[in-house]
Image (cartoon, rainbow, N blue to C red):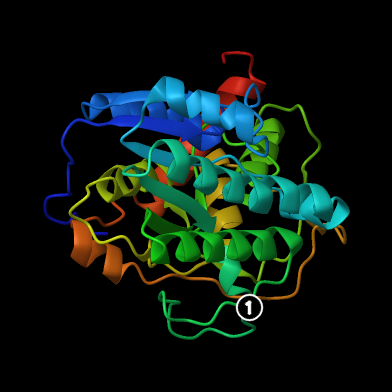
């Protein structure tokens, strides 16, 4: 994918990140500091559903901006524990917005939602843009759509709230509960002789839009700029990739020839979820820069190191 022109780089800010020790948060804090910002964060030591604890953290940080990453992001777990999912994703967002309005009302808030809010479509079509109706299906997706609605309401009441719908992103360090990382780990184990030559998969006919997590971080940093309108933005690679293609490329990287076994617990109906990021590109100059091959090579090398005892 071609590299776009300059990306917005906001002036130095104090940025507070919730969910700071998660996969994205661990990378985001150093990325913010590299961009010249003062970055602090919290994770499970601050329960985002508890107003007093969150208020105290915000008072200490005195942020100019808040990036809200804290969430339950495991879709399968959301089906098993829907009330917990709503509590973290919806109540946590409501608490955050309330406390920001109370103690840092001029701060910009980035609410990180999910492409899952659009819901699946059974056949290929035009990439989803921000005007596409949302049809969330899982408790996770519904909780994220509801949290975004809270953000829209807060924006209407005067808070500076950017609402993000992030498409699938991965990279070294992501849990293997997510599809690309799961495939990469299994393939690495087979290559190292630590797993029989059999891969357990879900629906390989599904189509997704995969990005490198570092490209996503660049989008978040760009959206901190107060000159960028506070609106809804897709963070998407605009690249339709069948899940089968991800698996085939990882297998080719490893030089293995495993059997493929469909796991009924992982199988989901065929769907297509690809985004249009033109609004974000127009507002900030951002576009995804990392190729799919580069992304999968990083995942493969990461899991080889982990499974080989080098990480």
Q: Is residue 106 above or below residue 193?
A: below
- Image spot of residue 5 (x, y percent): 12, 55
Measuring from the top left, give residue 139's x and y in whole percent: 75, 62
Q: Is residue 130 visible?
A: yes
Count of number-bearing discs: 1
Q: Of 46 and 78, which appears nearest the observer?
A: 46
Which residue does the image show at 21% across and 26% down from the upper left?
36
Please, which residue is most extreme toward the front here?
A: 102
- From this viewpoint, which residue is outermost toward the top? 310
Q: Is residue 73 visible?
A: no
> Which residue extends farthest left?
5
Left or right of 191 in this view: 158: left
Asked which quadrant contains residue 103, the reply is top left
Residue found at x 85% / y 50%:
81
Q: Going by the image, does 31 lie left or right of 244?
A: left
Query: 32 above or below 201?
Result: above
Identify the residue shown where x is 63% and y is 78%: 135
Front residue of 70/75: it is 70
Q: Nearer the viewer, residue 173 or 86?
A: 86
Q: Secondary structure at mark 1?
A: loop
Of 251 and 297, the residue lying toward us: 297
* Mark 1 lies on residue: 135
Quarter of the rendering occupied by the N terminus = bottom left
The picture places residue 25, in percent across and down from the top left corner, at 49, 32
Q: Residue at x 69, y 45 (%)?
A: 88
Position of 169 compared to 259: left or right? left
Q: Is residue 264 left or right of residue 109?
A: right
Vertical relation: 88 (above or below) 229: above
Name the spot of residue 287 as percent of width and height, x first: 26, 57
Figure quadrant of the C terminus: top right
Q: Is residue 255 above or below residue 123?
A: above
């Amino acid at each position: 994918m071609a590299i776009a022109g300059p990306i917005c780089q906001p002036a130095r800010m104090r940025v507070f990140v919730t969910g700071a020790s998660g996969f994205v948060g661990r990378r985001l804090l150093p990325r913010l500091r590299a961009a010249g910002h003062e970055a602090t964060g919290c994770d499970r030591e601050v329960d985002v559903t508890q107003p007093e604890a969150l208020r105290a953290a915000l008072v200490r940080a005195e942020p100019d901006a808040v990036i809200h990453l804290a969430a339950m992001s495991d879709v399968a777990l959301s089906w098993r524990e829907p009330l917990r999912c709503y509590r973290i994703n919806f109540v946590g967002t409501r608490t955050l917005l309330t406390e920001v309005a109370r103690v840092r009302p001029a701060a910009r808030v980035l609410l990180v939602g999910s492409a899952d809010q659009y819901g699946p479509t059974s056949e290929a079509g035009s990439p989803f843009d921000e005007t596409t109706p949302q049809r969330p299906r899982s408790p996770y997706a519904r909780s994220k759509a509801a949290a975004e609605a809270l953000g829209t309401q807060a924006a209407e009441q005067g808070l500076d709230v950017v609402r993000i719908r992030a498409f699938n992103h991965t990279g070294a360090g992501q849990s293997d509960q997510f599809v690309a990382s799961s495939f990469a780990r299994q393939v690495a184990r087979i290559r190292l002789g630590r797993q029989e030559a059999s891969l357990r998969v879900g629906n390989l006919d599904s189509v997704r839009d995969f990005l490198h997590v570092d490209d996503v971080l660049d989008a978040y940093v760009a959206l901190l700029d107060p000159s960028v309108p506070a609106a809804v933005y897709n963070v998407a690679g605009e690249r339709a990739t069948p899940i089968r293609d991800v698996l085939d490329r990882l297998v080719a990287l490893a030089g293995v020839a495993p059997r493929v076994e469909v796991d009924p617990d992982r199988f989901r109906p065929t769907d297509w979820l690809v985004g249009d990021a033109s609004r974000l590109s127009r507002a900030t100059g951002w576009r995804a820069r990392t190729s799919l091959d580069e992304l999968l090579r990083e995942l493969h090398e990461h899991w080889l190191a982990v499974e080989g005892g080098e990480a």
